[in-house]
Amino acid sequence: MSLKKVSVFLFCVFAVMVGYACAGTAAEIDVLVCPEGCGILLSDLYIGKEIKNMDPGITLNPVATPGYLYNLLEMGRNQSRWENSVFAINDDTLSFGPKGGKHPFTLFITEPVNAKFKLLYGFYWGVTGHYFITLDPNLKKFSDLKGKKLGLGLTTQSDWGMNPTLDLEYGYGITAENTKLHYLGPAKVAAPFLNGELDAIVAALGTDPSFSYWLPAEIFIALKKSGKKFYYIGQDTGTDSNLNEKLNTAYIPVDIPAGTLPSQTEIVHTIADRDFKACHESFPEDLAYRIVMIAAKIGPKMKLTVGLWQTWSPEMMVAGLSEENAHPGAVRAYKELGWWDLRKNFKPAILP
């Protein structure tokens, strides 16, 4: 469908939606997102402002949190949030919830999370934590990282901290017992790396289902300013299947094109998980429907005009959704939008 047709169609949908919203119940909804300064939080703050003109009956309150692992634990523990909160999360983190408190999740998910959640829409595919950056040209593969000093994110971060830890152990047999894993966090990992105190670090990177848009992390600003030459360490071919089998995940193989990152002269083969807005299964169907309709309407504007959701597309919103894992209100919205069949082009996310 052309952008012009999408815009016209969305305008028509919006007109219907406004009429529906006026008849809908008023609600104030918290959106658990990520730490201050993260791009997703900025996007939700914008949506929170614009929603007043689109569905006056809904108030969205984006909440800065320590990260996705916090969101998972908070939504699992706090039943008072189940009918009035949505949260940002990725598919693998949701699938790991019931295994909390056990190896290899003891550092990250401290207790089992057995609450049942449903997906609303996807907004981003995350390559974060699934590749490494180094100044040493002799470090070419993940297996070369064994015994080295590695800089990771915080243990409260699913992408920066948990992802690389699981990749290293279950993909290559690299653990804290044979390698030095330093959980420093995004704000503190660049300086020791550039000073030679760390052999390699992880960083953030996002993309969309067509692999047309790439969103590097802010850390690359500091790396570029250093003037040093960087090398990138990707995953071995087949690692996605290996990890999916061992961890019951739905990782997707991704090739980062040469030139996407500073000093990147070759394609980097790696993997991605998928980021979603989700809610508890008891979240009201009416509100789930309205939230998806709002995201569908505002997404094109944010991508083309505001520049806050460059990965938006109808495919982005439904990729990974299924009749089993999506909230019924979201499914209804996508069927009205005519986007529901687009999900068939992607494998569904695995929820416990």
Image: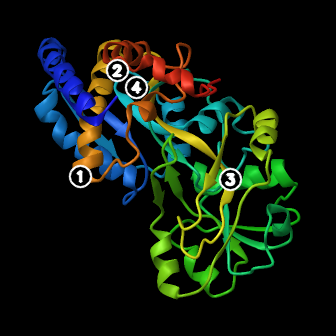
Judge by depth and name the residue closer to the eye, 198 or 334.
334
Residue drawn at x 62%, y 25% is: 351
Dot 3 lies on which element?
strand
Q: Amino acid at mark 1?
A: Val
Asked if 193 appears above or below 35 in the picture, the reply is below
Question: In the drawing, what numbered circle is on residue 270?
Answer: 3
Tell me residue 147's x, y (percent). 86, 71
Question: In the drawing, what numbered circle is on residue 288?
Answer: 2
Judge by depth and name the residue closer to the eye, 258 or 91.
258
Dot 1 lies on which element?
helix
Q: In which image quadrant can residue 277 be found?
A: top left
Which residue position is annotated with label 1?
306
Quadrant (top left, top right, bottom left, bottom right) of the N terminus: top left
Foreground mark, 3 or 2, reads 3
Local packing at callout 2 (Cα closer than 10 Å; few below 14, some 14-19, many 20+) is many
Left or right, 117 with respect to 45, comes to: right
Tell me residue 237's x, y (percent). 79, 49
- Cα separation, mark 3 vs mark 1, equals 30 Å
Q: Amino acid at mark 2?
A: Ala
